[in-house]
Image: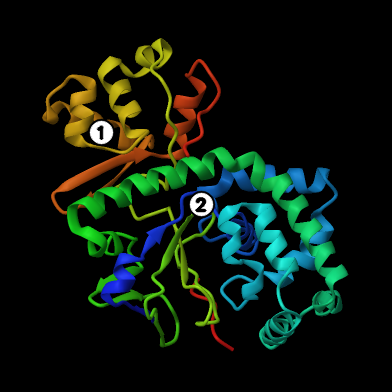
Amino acid sequence: MLRFHFSAEDLARTRVAAAPHPLWEIAASLHRFQTPAGRWAYAHWYRLARERLREAGLEDVVRRVLLPLFPRASYFPDFLTPLEGTAGLEAGLEAILGTPTDQVATELAALSRVTRMPAWLGRLTEQETRRELAEILRAYHRTVIAPHEEWMYESLHTERIRLARHLLDGGTEGLLGGLGPTVRWKHPRLEITTYPTEHDIRLEGRGLLLIPSYFCWKGPISLADPGLPPVLMYSTHHEALAGPARTASESPGSPPLQVLLGRSRAAVLQAAAAGATTTEAAHRAGVTPATATHHTTALRDAGLITSHRHGNTVIHTLTLMGATMLSKNQTGPLQESSSARRPRV
């Protein structure tokens, strides 16, 4: 089990990333190639990603360089996911290039103890080799991550809405208690129950940056070095009352959707795009809460929405299928909204 120990100052300094972290998403997406676990949730991406990598001539470099550098459910170097990546891909790549040589050497040595590392990766202490790696990461992102960014942003946007409700209802402790089934808040500790060994990190006033991730599946991931700014990347794919994992998309109403679902049910589906309680969906559709419950049940059974319970409240959000249906029925382009931790070795 991994435990983060909080003080009152740490609770005040806990925050949620405002945008996807491109380098963490690269790492998590590479893990999706290494296991069939959860692949159904990424089937739409997985098929296209393999085609695009093949068309771009990147299959070999992904296999030789990136997969060995980002092994799943194992240690991988901290310098590959710097905090600066919160400002975007280029800022993150610059931070990788600027990592002190001693840190790179130490982390590569740690990687070599847990996996067979190609000789080329051992030269990452050299600036020129790291520049080559930055180009590979940039090409990989451009090929399989950037075309999917609208889904990533919508997924994070919906997660921030969900967490905001937890924060408003229960304060920071409510937020920390709502991060998913593998994360448990027991004051003054945040516990990652799926972590295979016992580790404790004392935040000591630094707070914790929560990074919701589209490509992370199940177990959250943190950094191996407790001296680095504390972060926790975790999956936006939560256990739901029913239906598959979801993302979200906002879209205006459309007559074709109303013809297919009926006006009220289409309005409930549209309300779920931004995350809605049953009462809010009822207000949006102009129906009673009982009728809205009937509609949400039908939509959930059809795989168009998923529902998460928080206390006495159920929050409905879109599945990928529901988001796709809305996007296909809108009049304009999609709108963008603003397993285990790496073991110490």
Q: Closer to the N terminus: mark 1 or mark 2?
A: 2
> How far across and down, in percent of the image, does residue 273 sit?
37, 33
- Residue sitting at x 33%, y 44%: 161
| Residue type of the residue flagged with mark 1 | Thr
Q: CA distance from mark 1 to mark 2?
A: 24 Å
Q: Which mark is residue 296?
A: 1
- Residue sitting at x 36%, y 44%: 243
- 42 lies left or right of 49: left
Residue 180 appearing in the image: yes
> How far across and down, in percent of the image, does residue 99 sit?
70, 73
Q: Which mark is residue 322?
A: none
> Tag 2, which secondary structure?
loop
- Residue sitting at x 39%, y 10%: 255
Q: Which mark is residue 214?
A: 2
In the rendered view, tell whether residue 170 sits above or below residue 114: above
> How far across and down, in percent of the image, does residue 3 sit?
36, 80
In the rendered view, tell whether residue 48 sits above or below residue 82: above
Total label count? 2
Q: Nearer the viewer, residue 77 or 171?
A: 171
Mark 2 nearby-residue class (10 Å; few <14, some 14–19, many ≥20)? many
Quarter of the picture containing the N terminus is bottom left
In the rendered view, tell whether residue 286 sits above or below residue 56: above
> Tag 1, which secondary structure?
helix
The answer to whether marks 1 and 2 mark residues whose Cβ atoms lie closer than 8 Å is no
The colouring scheme, among rainbow, by chain, secondary structure or one colour, is rainbow
> How far across and down, in percent of the image, does residue 295 sit?
24, 28
| Residue type of the residue flagged with mark 2 | Tyr
Quarter of the picture containing the C terminus is bottom right
